[in-house]
Amino acid sequence: MTTETQAPTQHRIAAGFIAFVMLLLALSMWTVIPLIWLWIGSQLAATQFPSLGPYAVVLFGVIVSILFVGWLLGLLNEVYLKLTGVRNVAPIRLGWLKSLRDSQKTQRPPSVLETVIVGSALIAAVALLAWFFTLAGSPISNGA
């Protein structure tokens, strides 16, 4: 195997690893980040009915953490695009701004970042529904 064929294979492996890390980071936006900040807020609360402080810490922490992970996802997307050599990120003209005469099929395929974000949101929604219908239990007592 020559170095010319080795480099693209290594780039594909690295790009696949980066896409996997992007998926994990995107999933963490729906799961790990909120749970960690809820735990931090629970540790800050002295009573079972705390004041606004722990809630504000949780809200601020979740927002800042998700913004940071979004920034990391953007950086990883740039690395992915450089590794694969694909530069299909183009301006999108919204449908309501087009005339009916412009109805060419010039739709581009979704980028890896779009796929990862939508995929992680779908996985999180399915997991939430599965938990709700199988493990959540009823808050209404049956002994009434």
Image (cartoon, grey):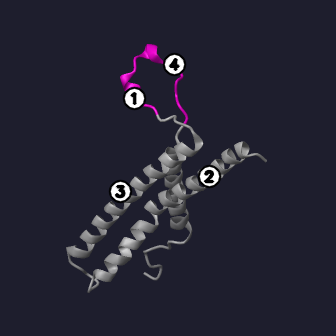
Q: Residues within 10 Å of mark 1 (few under 14, many from 20)?
A: few
Q: Answer with mark 1 or mark 2, whichever residue precedes in sequence.
A: 2
Three-letter amino acid code at disc 1? Leu
Q: Tell me the number on the disc at residue 67.
A: 3
| In this rendering, the label closer to the viewer, 3 or 1 | 3
Q: Estimate the spatial distance between the alpha carbons at disc 2 and disc 3, rounded to whole Å.
A: 24 Å
Residue placed under numbered mark 2 in the picture = 16
Three-letter amino acid code at disc 3? Leu
Q: Estimate the spatial distance between the alpha carbons at disc 3 and disc 4, rounded to whole Å.
A: 36 Å
The relative height of residue 116 versus residue 129 in the rendered view (above or below) is above
Q: Answer with mark 2 or mark 3, whichever residue precedes in sequence.
A: 2
Q: Residue furthest bottom?
A: 46
Q: Tell me the number on the disc at residue 94.
A: 1
Residue 53 placement: quadrant: bottom left
Q: Answer with mark 2 or mark 4, whichever residue precedes in sequence.
A: 2
Whether the residues at callouts 4 and 1 have beta carbons within 8 Å, the answer is no
Is 48 positioned to the left or the right of 107 in the image? left
The region drawn magenta spans: 90-109
Q: Answer with mark 3 or mark 1, whichever residue precedes in sequence.
A: 3
Residue placed under numbered mark 4 in the picture = 104
Is 113 positioned to the left or the right of 53 in the image? right
Q: Estimate the spatial distance between the alpha carbons at disc 3 and disc 1, rounded to whole Å.
A: 25 Å
Camera-nearest residue between 120 and 24: 24
Residue 14: percent from left, percent from top? 61, 53
The magenta stretch spans residue 63: no
